[in-house]
Image (tube, rainbow, N blue to C red):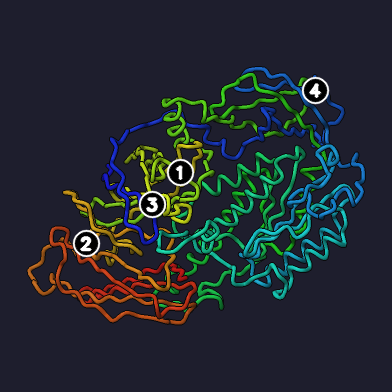
């Protein structure tokens, strides 16, 4: 049940450009991909499909050597395939590399920008290991533990066949030491991480919130989307994977992290994209939570403020601390499981992570074939590999996604690509897409759910036409309940046309639609395609629409905006329209210091009738405050409301206009204080804000 509120805007000080609404296509697709396929994606290069196979004796577990291509049978979707390439990799057969060959003249070879001289043949039988230090998530103690673990590996476990590199993520992704067998060079690179004085460790770069760039009145570039976005770690892993994709050998990434906090509404597509990029590149991730063994206190530790209320006594505070610890490890565990690696946490001994990596990459067969199915349809293809002898156990990834071709597809094929991408477990991430969703009560059992998407204008190729630059983007989306039933669908083609001098590459395209849903848990996915090259991007997340009838105080989402526009005429109820103005959601929560921050939220009264008129009349007190750390730096005057703004919905809507000129640039916590003086209830929702 979709409310057809459609808008496309080019964000700066420009007015919204309203796209002419097209008839919505209620497309459904029952041709779902293998539900387990997201964890098993193989590399496809020049139509040659490569897969690694480890053959073990069932009784002893030892690797079986001496097999040939004739000993294997390869089936794709049940059809036999001809083995065209076959090789056995073993670190025992590695030929030592000259260090000049490994490093190249520039010292930047495999991961860096230098041309280098190492090829896949030269790396045969070698073990390639990436030591990845996520500086944005680790505290100084965590960083010290990670450095010590890496040093122990280099000094005690690193073998002559190992080529190791050191990569760090701070304010940017840096290759601090390319692949080398030189232990001293590696120790020097790793040691630099264990000091806040070294370039690369930047405490100010730490970010654990999930926000993205907004449609504010300033000129953004793509790097700003990651200022307060936890997905930047996943993008970094995907980038490392793509840099290594041309090397056929198995590769391992030791990921040292303090945990990845998945706060707020999350882009699950970025997680799947990172894991699939790693599997395509034949890269296994061994993730380690460097927080080590922890004793979780019911009242929290010194990093948090004191607890107020009854949560310290009823177990809720302790449960919250357990949940926070679990959530920080969940992504690390998923990355490891979905790429064939292992996760290590809740321990101060990280040597087993290195040992497991060495055991998994010591000996294996590499089998390559060219598929007899020439269709470039992007579908999942199941592999089955058999050994023509008994009593052996095979370990391999059982499938891959075929490539898809856009330029040679017709209209029907392109529509099918959209619907298949919507149903696919393999996310499209060529075009960055950012999304936010909110909820407002229309009735006790129905909620208005506005959904807003942002696409950077630089990702959309505009074609010159007269004095205008033109482009079209296709948008398809759906909301499903937890049983997989579709509750709402969107299919829209948005036409964009702007003056050439407006420099669209420095702006964002924003698209907003909405759904009407009952309380419950849902899964939302949107796919965006620009129609010049056919590149697509996707965003999907779980959405919880709360049942406010069970809440002590019924408060809607808090919507932050940096723009308000004249509202289009509509007969349908839209809580985002107040006093003739349409509130345009600021998806990123990023604002300019010389601009305004607009807040909109609603408080709902009880529908129960009572003889006491005074008890029925509301008296609400509310204010907005900004916190820098634990220090309050700004608070609006207290506002009192005693009358309903919408009697039909028993609603009081609050609107705030906060000038930001007195706030210094930086990150803040925006807290909304709402007190129901009649009922003795209160609510203090919080959200992150970045002021530039």
* Upstream in sequence: badge 3 or badge 1: 1
Q: Mark 2 sits on what residue?
A: 578
Badge 4: residue crowd in 10 Å (few <14, some 14–19, many ≥20): some
Q: In screen coordinates, is 402 left or right of 650?
A: right
Alpha carbon separation for disc pair 3 and 4: 53 Å
Q: Nearer the viewer, mark 2 or mark 3?
A: 3
Name the residue nearer the viewer: 258 or 267: 267
Res 476 seen here: yes
Alpha carbon separation for disc pair 2 and 4: 70 Å
| Residue at (31% x, 45% y) in the render | 19
Q: Mark 4 sits on what residue?
A: 69
Q: Nearer the viewer, mark 2 or mark 4?
A: 2
Question: Would you place residue 369 above or below residue 289 in this image?
Answer: above
| Residue at (86% x, 60% y) in the render | 155
Alpha carbon separation for disc pair 3 and 1: 16 Å
* Upstream in sequence: badge 2 or badge 3: 3
Question: Would you place residue 278 above or below residue 547 in this image?
Answer: above
Q: Mark 1 sits on what residue?
A: 462
The location of residue 446, given as percent across then percent down, is: 24, 50
- For the view shown, which residue lies furthest in the front direction? 466
Name the residue nearer the viewer: 672 or 681: 672
Q: Secondary structure at mark 2?
A: strand
Q: Mark 3 sits on what residue?
A: 510
Query: Residue 387's image quarter?
Result: top right
* Upstream in sequence: badge 2 or badge 4: 4
The location of residue 618, given as percent across then percent down, is: 17, 72
Badge 3: residue crowd in 10 Å (few <14, some 14–19, many ≥20): many
Q: Which mark is residue 42?
A: none
Alpha carbon separation for disc pair 2 and 3: 20 Å
Label 3 with label 4: CB-CB less than 8 Å: no
Q: Secondary structure at mark 4?
A: helix
* Upstream in sequence: badge 3 or badge 4: 4
């Amino acid at each position: 049940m979709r409310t057809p509120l459609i808008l496309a805007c080019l964000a700066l000080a420009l007015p919204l450009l309203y796209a002419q609404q097209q008839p919505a296509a209620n497309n459904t697709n029952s041709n779902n991909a293998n539900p387990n396929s997201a964890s098993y994606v193989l590399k496809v290069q020049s139509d040659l499909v490569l897969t690694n196979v480890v053959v073990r004796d069932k009784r002893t577990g030892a690797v079986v050597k001496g097999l040939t291509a004739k000993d294997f049978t390869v089936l794709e979707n049940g059809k036999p395939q001809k083995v065209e390439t076959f090789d056995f990799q073993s670190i025992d057969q590695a030929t030592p590399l000259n260090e000049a060959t490994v490093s190249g003249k520039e010292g930047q070879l495999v991961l860096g920008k230098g041309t280098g001289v190492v090829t896949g043949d030269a790396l045969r039988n070698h073990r390639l290991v990436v030591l990845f230090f996520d500086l944005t998530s680790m505290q100084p103690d965590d960083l010290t533990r990670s450095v010590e673990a890496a040093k122990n590996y280099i000094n005690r476990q690193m073998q002559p066949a190992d080529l190791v590199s050191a990569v760090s993520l701070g304010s940017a992704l840096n290759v601090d030491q390319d692949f080398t067998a030189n232990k001293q060079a590696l120790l020097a690179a790793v040691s630099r991480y264990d000091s806040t004085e070294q370039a690369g460790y930047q405490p100010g770069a730490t970010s654990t919130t999930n926000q993205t760039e907004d449609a504010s009145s300033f000129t953004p570039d793509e790097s700003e989307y990651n200022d307060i976005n936890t997905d930047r770690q996943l993008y970094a892993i995907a980038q490392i994977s793509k840099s290594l994709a041309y090397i056929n050998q198995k590769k391992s990434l030791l990921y040292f992290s303090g945990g990845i906090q998945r706060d707020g509404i999350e882009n699950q597509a970025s997680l799947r994209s990172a894991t699939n990029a790693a599997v395509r590149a034949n890269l296994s991730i061994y993730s380690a939570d460097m927080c080590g063994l922890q004793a979780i206190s019911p009242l929290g530790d010194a990093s948090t403020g004191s607890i107020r209320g009854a949560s310290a006594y009823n177990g809720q505070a302790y449960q919250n601390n357990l949940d926070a610890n679990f959530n920080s490890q969940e992504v690390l565990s998923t990355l490891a499981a979905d790429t064939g690696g292992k996760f290590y946490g809740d321990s101060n001994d990280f040597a087993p992570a290195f040992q497991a990596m060495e055991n998994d990459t010591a000996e294996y067969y590499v089998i390559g074939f060219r598929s007899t199915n020439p269709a470039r349809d992007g579908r999942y293809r199941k592999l089955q590999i058999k050994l023509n002898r008994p009593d052996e156990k095979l370990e391999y990834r059982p499938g891959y996604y075929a490539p898809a071709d856009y330029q040679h597809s017709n209209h029907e094929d392109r529509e099918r690509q959209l619907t298949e991408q919507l149903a696919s477990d393999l996310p499209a991430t060529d075009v960055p897409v950012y999304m936010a969703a909110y909820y407002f009560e229309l009735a006790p059992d129905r909620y208005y759910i506005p959904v807003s998407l942002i696409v950077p204008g630089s990702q959309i190729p505009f074609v010159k036409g007269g004095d205008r630059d033109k482009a079209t983007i296709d948008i398809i989306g759906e909301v499903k309940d937890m049983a997989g039933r579709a509750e709402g669908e969107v299919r829209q083609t948005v036409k964009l046309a702007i003056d050439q001098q407006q420099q669209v590459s420095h702006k964002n395209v924003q698209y907003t639609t909405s759904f009407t849903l009952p309380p419950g848990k849902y899964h939302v996915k949107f796919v965006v395609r620009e129609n010049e090259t056919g590149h697509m991007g996707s965003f999907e997340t779980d959405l919880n629409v709360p049942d406010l009838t069970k809440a002590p105080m019924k408060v809607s989402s808090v919507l932050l905006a940096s723009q308000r526009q004249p509202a289009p005429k509509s007969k349908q109820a839209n809580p985002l329209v107040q006093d003739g103005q349409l509130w345009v959601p600021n998806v990123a929560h990023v604002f300019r210091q010389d601009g305004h921050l607009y807040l909109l939220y609603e408080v709902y009264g009880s529908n129960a009738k009572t003889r006491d008129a005074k008890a029925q009349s509301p008296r609400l007190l509310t204010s907005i405050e900004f916190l820098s750390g634990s220090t309050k730096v700004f608070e609006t005057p207290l506002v009192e409301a005693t009358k309903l703004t919408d009697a039909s919905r028993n609603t009081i809507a609050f609107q705030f206009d906060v000038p930001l000129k007195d706030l210094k640039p930086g990150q803040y916590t925006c807290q909304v204080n709402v007190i129901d003086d009649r009922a003795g209830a209160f609510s203090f929702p919080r959200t992150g804000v970045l002021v530039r």
